[in-house]
Image (cartoon, grey):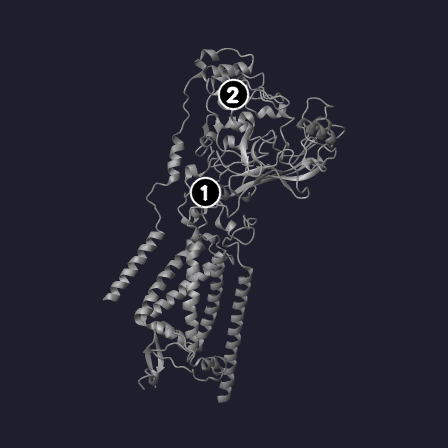
Amino acid sequence: MKKRVLIYKGFERFWHWMQAILIFFLIFTGFEIHGSYTFLGFKDAVKYHNLAAYLFLLLTMFAIFWHLTTGEYKQYIPTLKNIKAQLDFYLFGIFKNAPHPTKKTLLSKLNPLQRITYFGLKIILIPTSIISGILYMMYRYPTRHGIEAINIDSLEIIAIIHTASAFLMVTFIIMHLYLITTGDTITSNLKAMLTGYEEIEDDKLHPEIK
Amino acid sequence: MRKILLLLLSFGLVTAIIYGTLKSNELEKPHILILKEKYSKREYKKEADHSKFEILNQDFPNPREITKACEYCHNLTAHEIMKSNHFNWERVEYVKDRGIVFIGKKNAINNFCIAAQGNEKACAKCHVGLGLDEKGNLFTDPTNIDCMICHDNTETYMKASERGGEPEKSLDFKNIIHNVGKPKRSNCGVCHFFGGGGNNVKHGDLESIQFEATRDIDVHMAIDGVNMHCIDCHKTKEHNIFGKLYSLSSMNRERISCEECHTNTPHNDDIINEHTLKVSCQACHIPIYAKANATMIYWDWSTAGKLKNGEPYIEKDAEGNKTYMSTKGSFKWGKNLKPDYIWFNGTASHYLIGDKIKDPKSPLFLNTLHGSYKDDDSKIIPVKIHTAKQPYDPVNNILIQPKLYSEEKGSGAFWKDFDWIKASEMGMREHGMPFSGKVGFIETKMYWPLNHMVSPKEKAVRCEECHTRNNSRIANLRDFYIPGRDYSPLVDRIGRLLIVFTILLVFVHGSGRIVANHIRRRRTR
């Protein structure tokens, strides 16, 4: 028996979609600054990229706060359990209409592959982007009167790291967008992220009680 | 409850930070308005009516008598001008790897008429003294100061050609000395606009259009703008005028800068203000130069000396710019030019007469401007680069200074006899320099920093003219990273491959699912 359950809470959905909008915008303006194409003009691209960066920073701070206070961060602790089964599903099972090897529950919304990916995203990729981005924004030309120890001689390394993480982010988004369609139905994952509700097997709601 | 408090607290903190970062100080009166007010009120009030002085109401047979009359009252200023580079044509400079040297028109070589020495009689037309002899000796008697060339306010004073700096005899001297005052644009421009033998030949950003410039040409000197005169910026201390050009100067001193009036954070945008640490104001605000009349960009001495029916001749292009002169060679001109950009820290070295040429195959820079990204004193400045082909001695490897000017034929002067060997022999002998008897030609280059012809702010260089991969204005400055122009080709290639690979994977996996689904449905049917 299936039951409609609130799986993504209000703040979670707000955070997800704001993050989605900001990241799309940051990538769009960022690659213009990178010189890949011209759309807004360099000056406006920089202006709006920086503005979006501040908003993203703000959102991230709220998200960290939320994760820590609600304990939701535990969802992202990677596990090796079932990882082979999950890989098998994406490589073979999905073509045979096999069921998902891991069930979504309120306490475990993410499958093992998602856990590893999101862990990497949140602990490595986004922090790298943010830190290199802050250095990029705060970068000042080396001056005689600066403090020698914190003088950065060149923007080059900062900029290249920032660019590399942007490429990885684009790669993540492409995969992410595609994997939305691998839920119970093509649109069930998307619907869940929009409305917050998803139909989940009743008996799997609280597996630990069973 | 505690959670809500914490949340509110962090929210308040973040808002305060964002507000502090993003707000701009709109309340202050814009600095540019203060400057505009200052210069709209300015007027030159004369301190004395010189026509009332008895000593000036007589006929002067000799310009030296006029100087004497000036010095009768201004009896403490004569020695000032005699210490200045306008009179001495040289300065004491410390130059790296050379030490303390006198540098000036006497020992430097330029890219145009090569050098003044040996040609003083003609060159002295732009000397603030009444006499230079053929050996370049200054007449050190203070009566040889030419006060009128700078202080005549009638715009009628004129020096005679090839007379060592003497004025034309036909001038109305009484009118001139009754109307003396602070130097006007015409006093400075008559020499500085015509350096190199014609209007705008040398500088590119200083030319006769600035006698009556419009805002589009030069926002500072514009008669429809703030109408500034040369001396508004080029302040004078004891007849020593500040602001100088690195065709002859070497040290970082006595310069004038935009920042003195405009401060070094004149923009509302912090990111643009940050640029002023490494980018000069001129780099963005002089987007083009030679806006009204062409400036010379190439001078080839090697073609000089061709004659038609035994006579020297001149050719001109459609705009009236000389393209060939038998006396001087071939020229190329440019109008509305984009500057070149270099790093510059305010110091320069110069090729001085007698210096060995290291490599005659590559261009020889007559003035090397020092600077780099890593150097804290350096900024990017716009320059005009003038290229020439000049005579040199291929055996001794030194530049030749030929004898050019003479009054009569047969003296060996190139402009009369058109013989490189003879002119070189004469010129080098006058300098006490060796000459092997052979004349070759070498490419020489000279930097002319651009400081004038500032455009209205709407026409300033836009961000994407430098921050772009193709045709960046600063494409030649490669010792630093700028966004938009630079990137790591490796990271970009890997990144692009990764994206393509991911899209392919999605495509293959997705179509696999569609096909599998299709087959499954058919089976169940």
- Residue A171: give x, y in percent of width and height: 48, 68
Whether residue B352 sits left or right of residue A176 in the image: it is right
Looking at the image, which residue is at 38% across and 30% down? B41
Pointer 2: what residue? B148
Return the residue found at the far right: B309
Callout 2: helix, strand or loop? helix
Callout 1: helix, strand or loop? helix
Q: Is residue A4 above or below residue B75?
A: below
Q: On the rendered image, what quadrant is the C terminus of chain A found in?
A: bottom left
Of labels 2 and 1, earlier in sequence is 2
Query: Which of the chains bears the disc numbered 2?
Result: B
Return the residue found at the far left: B1
Pointer 1: what residue? B457
- Residue A72: give x, y in percent of width and height: 34, 72
Whether residue B406 sits left or right of residue B63 in the image: it is right
- Mark 2–mark 1 Cα distance, whole angstroms, equals 37 Å
- Residue B354: give x, y in percent of width and height: 65, 34
Specify the amino acid type for callout 2: Met
Which of the 4 quarters of the picture holds residue B127? top right
Q: Is residue A67 above or below residue B135?
A: below
Q: Is residue B3 above or below residue B290?
A: below
Whether residue A101 sits left or right of residue A195 in the image: it is right
Query: Which of the chains bears the disc numbered 1?
Result: B
Decide if residue B231 is in sight here: yes
Closer to the camera, B394 or B463? B394
Decide if residue B449 is in sight here: no
Res. A9 mark: none
Whether residue B503 sits left or right of residue A63 in the image: it is right
Q: On the rendered image, what quadrant is the N terminus of chain A found in?
A: bottom left
Specify the amino acid type for callout 1: Lys
Closer to the camera, B325 or B401? B401
Label 2: few (<14), some or many (≥20) within 10 Å? many
